[in-house]
Amino acid sequence: MTSDGFANIVDAESLRPVTKPKKLHNMPITSCAFQPDRNSVVTASTDYTYKFTNLSDFSATKTFKNLLLRLGLLFLILVFLADYFY
């Protein structure tokens, strides 16, 4: 956890980062709990928000797939709007 709202997944023995940090909150993260049965992390922040995050959400490939999905959706919206206005 960091003071700027990022969560870092690190190896317990070497303390080396396993994945890139992910921004979960806009304010400092004050607490964190790991749920091994669900493979997820729960974080809490000073702005009284809680985030339930699956550990697979930290993967770079999932982030890339989400980006492609959002770009594709934006493209479809633009195509629909272009047909609507022309």
Image (spheres, grey):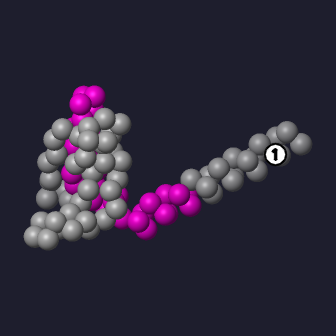
Q: Which residue shows up at 25% across the image and 65% down it?
A: 17
Q: Which residue shows up at 28% across the image and 28% down it?
A: 47
Q: Could one spot residue 50 in this view of the protein?
A: no
For label 1, the SS is helix
On-image quarter of the C terminus: top right
With 82 as the anchor, is 76 left or right in this view?
left
Q: Could one spot residue 46 in this view of the protein?
A: yes
In the rendered image, residue 72 lying in the magenta stretch gets the answer no
Q: Between 73 and 61, which is closer to the camera in this rendering?
A: 61
| Residue 12 spot, x, y in % from top left | 12, 66
Give the magenta-colored segment's residue range: 40-69
Q: Which residue shows up at 49% across the image and 63% down it?
A: 65
With 72 as the anchor, is 23 left or right in this view?
left
| Residue 9 spot, x, y in % from top left | 24, 60
Q: Between 46 and 58, which is closer to the camera in this rendering?
A: 46
In the rendered image, residue 44 lying in the magenta stretch gets the answer yes
- Looking at the image, the residue that sits furthest to the bottom is 14
Q: Between 13 and 85, which is closer to the camera in this rendering?
A: 13
Q: Amino acid at mark 1?
A: Ala
With 60 as the anchor, is 12 left or right in this view?
left
